[in-house]
Image (spheres, rainbow, N blue to C red):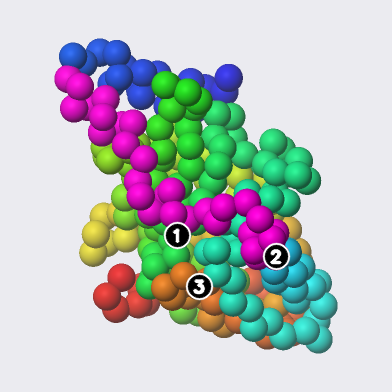
Amino acid sequence: MSRKSFLLAASIALVLTGSTSATLFLLIRHEPEAYRRACLPPGPVRTQRSQEFKKGFFELLNACTNKDRELDLRLTDEQINSYFAEDFKRSGLAQHLLPEKISEPRIILEPGKVRLAFRYGSGLWSTIITIDFGLWLPAKEPNVVALELQGLHAGSLPIGAQAFLDNLSDIAEQNNIQVSWHRYPPTGNPVALLRFQSDTRDPMLQLNDVHVEQGNLVIRGKPLDSEPAQSASLPSNKPAGN
């Protein structure tokens, strides 16, 4: 078990076993209704939605490697969650990419917000971790997406964020996404600046729109002529109302 996984497991176990309060136990064991609803039941529709996600993902990859290709992509949380339940497991990517003790990831998309949820642990010693991120595209920062951590819960109980921030950085960097952390002054929340194609000297794609609608993630981009990459700074153009 990695040190980060051990610390998180120990924190949850201490809350569960170190308190005589049944309320705390129920708070941690609570399974949010949005998490239960996020995944379609097995069947042809879920299989089709998984295939639709794969098609969209390959469209994104092609746009990143083809200098003449524009990108206008819309993915639904239904497609993403169907992929997690179907091809993500069958392909072995779940076992390869998910950190220790994490399973059954799901995404809920709301205006300006991404809610990531997953099961941590198994059996009685498990809980649903929910992480809320604000998402926007900083101005004048090529291929940088800002994620503001807005909330982190085990069940319905707020918990500390550091172990998950570290895991997010590790996963991103393993997939050639450079991560830098800042504090967003209006809220004091941590903000991750994700620089895509960080391992590519001459990126092919310039992101010009990334935003979240109800149930939809919209990504648009255009071919990019070779230009020196700019250094990312703390984003200052967060959309109003997020």
Lateral position of residue 100 relative to residue 137, left or right: right
Lateral position of residue 108 relative to residue 78, left or right: left
Q: Which residue lies under the disc numbered 3?
A: 216
Furthest toward the front, the residue is 43
Percent across and percent down for residue 211 are 47, 75
How far is mark 1 from mark 2, CA to CA?
A: 19 Å
Q: How many marks?
A: 3
As drawn, 199 above or below 16:
below
Q: Which residue lies under the disc numbered 1?
A: 108
User: What amino acid does circle 2 point to?
Assistant: Gln
Q: Secondary structure at mark 2?
A: helix
Task: State which mark lies toward you, 3 or 2.
Answer: 2
Percent across and percent down for residue 193 are 49, 60
Residue at image position (20%, 22%) is 22
Mark 1 or mark 3: whose residue is earlier in sequence: 1
User: What amino acid does circle 1 point to?
Assistant: Ile
| Residue 70 seen in this snapshot | yes
Q: Secondary structure at mark 3?
A: strand
| Residue 173 seen in this snapshot | no
